[in-house]
Structure formats: C-alpha cells, structure tokens
Amino acid sequence: MELTPKVKFLGMTFDVTLMIGSVVSALIVMLIVFLLTRRLSVRPEGRQNVMEYIIDFVSGITGTMLEKKESAKYLSFALTTFLFILVANLLGVIVMVTSTVNGPIPSLGITTAGLKMADNSVSWFKSPTSDINVTVAMAGAIFLYSHFAGIAKSPRGYLQHYVKPFWWMLPIHLIDEVSKPATHALRLWANIFAGEVLITILREGAFYFTGVPLFAWMGFSVFVGCIQAYIFTVLAMVYIAQKVGEE
C-alpha cells in the first residue's frame, strides 16, 4: 500500500503529493512554452521550430476531428492538455521521492496504522497521472465540458443525438456516455501506475545492481507516457467533436 501525506480543508481531503506533482507539471509546461516562444521571428529556427512542430502536431489532431473553423477554437485546449499530461506522465520516470517515517504525523494524515501497512514509507513526489483521482478528475472535466459545448452550440441537435437513428436506442446512448469518462480515465491511470510500480520494484530489487532492466523499462515508460498523452488528447477531441461537430 502506498502512503501519501494529506491535509484537510473545509471538510475536504487534499493529497499533498498529488498537489506538488500537479503544480510542478504546470510550471514545467509554462517554462517550456515560455522558453520555446521567446524572440519569435518570421524565419523560425531553433527553439521556435520545436514549438511550431508541437503546435502543428496538435493541430493535426484537432483538424482530423473537426472542421477548420471549429478546430481552431480548440487548438489551445488540446495543446495544453497534451503538454500537461505528457509532462505529468514523465515525472515519475525521472524522479520519485519517498522517505522513511518512524512515527505518525497527524497533521499530514500519516497514522501508525498507515505506516505499518506501508512499511514506514511515505511517497512525496510522483507522476500525478499515476493516481486514479487525477485522471478521473481530468476525464470528468472533459466529459462535462463536451456536453456543455454541445448544448451551447445546438440544444435541439444535442438532445436529438440521443434518439438517433431510433428512439429505442436512448438507453444505449446513455450507457455509452457514462462509459466514456470511465475508460478515458482508467486507460491513462493504469498504464502510468503500472509503469511506476515496476520501476519501484526494479530500483529496490536485485536487478538494481545490473542497471540494464531498470533503464530499459524506464525507456519504455517514456514511450508509453508519450503515447498515452497522445491517446488521451485524441479521445478528448473525439468526445468534444461528437457534441459540436457539424455532422
């Protein structure tokens, strides 16, 4: 069992490890974008070329799902989503911080029973996307946003979608809508969580001294993190396009 410090505020519980990871991910994204967009010129080179390549890549995702005018509206949303999840996925591959705590810390929700189950180990820093609460929150936000966008564009068309092509397909459409955020969140979480678990095992096990399996898996985890950021962004745009697309 993994133990993380938590604080309570206004009757709600906040995971300190996830807050640190999320803030660090956001700051890294802001820093990357800032460094890549300094001193823009009409003749792009160096860092500007990298940023334009990223924008073109994400623009290809939105352009595939939506008409040109509509895709331009969601480019910044898709770009932010892709960069944040990409950085968040890779944080745990680069560094995971855990420490041994010998006694309970009530102010951080660290109890004697929790320390016993976690072998006195407390996690302070990891990929925020390796926690299902984060992926559920992101998938849920995209789910709600896609529905609001569809209602705002055409309330009648939005409602008619649930009874097409036949009225008796309404229950099937409702089941489909509920399953979207669930699969959206679980896919990302399961891949990143499993990768970090194996990295932890290799670091603490006998394979640590050989190094080869650990670095091989870390390289594969980087690949998986990139792929999952792409898939999550694509699915987000697919769900939005289903609600606001002309067809």
Image (cartoon, rainbow, N blue to C red):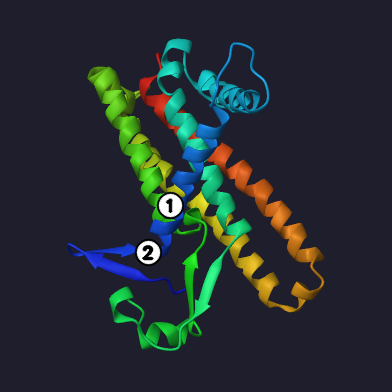
Earlier in the chain: of badge 1 and badge 2, it is 2
Give the quadrant of residue 108. bottom left
Identify the residue position indicated by label 2 in the image.
Answer: 16
Query: How far across and down, in percent of the image, does residue 84 sit?
Result: 49, 42
Viewer-proximal residue among 73 and 34: 34
Say whether residue 161 is left or right of residue 188. Answer: left
Query: How far across and down, in percent of the image, does residue 160 sit?
Result: 29, 22
Crowd class of label 2 (few under 14; some 14 to 19; many from 20; radius 10 Å) = some
Name the residue located 36 percent from the left edge and 64 percent from the top edge. Answer: 15
Name the kind of residue labelled 1 in the image.
Ser
Q: Quadrant of the C terminus?
A: top left
Say whether residue 135 is left or right of residue 223. Answer: left
Identify the residue position indicated by label 1 in the image.
Answer: 22
Name the residue located 54 percent from the left edge and 37 percent from the top edge. Answer: 32
Q: Is residue 183 visible?
A: no
Crowd class of label 1 (few under 14; some 14 to 19; many from 20; radius 10 Å) = many
Name the residue located 55 percent from the left edge and 33 percent from the top edge. Answer: 35
Give the quadrant of residue 43. top right
Viewer-proximal residue among 152 and 5: 5
Seen as rendered, the residue at the extreme left is 10
Give the quadrant of residue 144. top left
**SS label for mark 2:** helix
Query: How far across and down, in percent of the image, does residue 205 sit?
Result: 71, 77
Q: CA distance from mark 1 to mark 2?
A: 10 Å
User: Are dots 1 and 2 in contact, CB under 8 Å?
Assistant: no
Q: Which mark is residue 10?
A: none
